[in-house]
Image (cartoon, grey):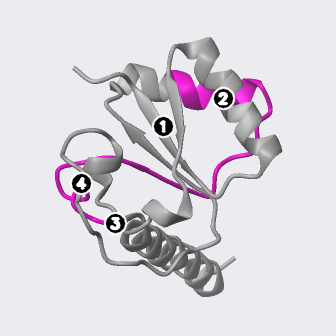
């Protein structure tokens, strides 16, 4: 089994330092993904498949995003709990590497996560507006 890894996209130096410290403490690997690799499939970035020889160029994105790879539910929950205890602000876009998203690029995953977040927020707001007090 591959080492439990968190792929990190667009984190500030301060956020990355906190993530690396937390990962070191928990026995996880924090891997920074440079923008030139944003056109690679997540499976290649996570070490599951070979990296394409000449991937297409991808439009970079600026949002912070992390992807949990090769982690058990216990490891994931421990990471989230410890991050909260350490008062590390939540990462707005986060996902778990799955068979469904493994062939997506980081750009596609970011777009999907943002769309889901918007749907949740608009649903939450619609629910509040329709509420009878």
Q: Is residue 3 magenta?
A: no
Q: CA distance from mark 2 to mark 4?
A: 23 Å
Which class describes the residues within 10 Å of circle 2: few (<14), some (14-19), or many (20+)?
some
Q: CA distance from mark 3 to mark 2?
A: 23 Å
Check whether the beta carbons of the residues at disc 1 and disc 3 lie within 8 A of each other: no
Tell me the magenta residue range: 78-104
Which class describes the residues within 10 Å of circle 4: few (<14), some (14-19), or many (20+)?
many
Q: Secondary structure at mark 2?
A: helix
Residue at image location 47% in from the left, 69% down from the top? 110
Check whether the beta carbons of the residues at disc 4 and disc 3 lie within 8 A of each other: no
Check whether the beta carbons of the residues at disc 1 and disc 2 lie within 8 A of each other: no
> What residue does disc 4 label?
102
> What residue does disc 1 label?
6
Q: CA distance from mark 4 to mark 3?
A: 8 Å
Question: N-terminal of the two: label 1 or label 2?
Answer: 1
Residue at image location 70% in from the left, 23% down from the top? 21
Q: Quadrant of the N terminus?
A: top left
Question: N-terminal of the two: label 4 or label 1?
Answer: 1
Q: Secondary structure at mark 1?
A: strand
Q: Quick one: 60 or 69, which is closer to the camera?
A: 60
> What residue does disc 3 label?
105
Q: Is residue 44 left or right of residue 9?
A: left
Residue 37 position by quadrant: bottom left
Q: CA distance from mark 1 to mark 3?
A: 15 Å
> What residue does disc 2 label?
20
Q: Which mark is residue 106?
A: none
Residue at image location 21% in from the left, 40% down from the top? 48
Q: Is residue 114 left or right of residue 62?
A: left
Instruction: Find residue 66 and report its horizontal and vertical position in percent.
Output: 52, 49
Instruction: Find residue 82 and report its horizontal and vertical position in percent.
Output: 65, 23
The vertical placement of 117 against 129, above or below, is above
Q: Secondary structure at mark 4?
A: loop
């Amino acid at each position: 089994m591959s080492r439990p890894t968190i792929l990190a996209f667009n984190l500030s130096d301060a956020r990355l330092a906190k993530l690396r410290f937390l990962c070191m403490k928990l026995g996880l690997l924090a891997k920074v993904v440079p923008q030139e690799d944003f056109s690679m499939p997540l499976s290649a970035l996570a070490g599951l498949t070979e990296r394409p020889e000449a991937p297409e160029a991808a439009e970079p994105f600026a949002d912070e995003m992390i992807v949990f790879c090769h982690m058990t539910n216990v490891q994931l929950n421990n990471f989230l709990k410890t991050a909260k205890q350490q008062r590390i602000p939540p990462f707005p876009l986060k996902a778990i590497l799955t068979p469904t998203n493994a062939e997506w690029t980081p750009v596609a995953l970011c777009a999907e996560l943002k769309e889901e977040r918007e749907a949740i927020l608009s649903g939450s707001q619609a629910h509040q507006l329709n509420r009878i007090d």
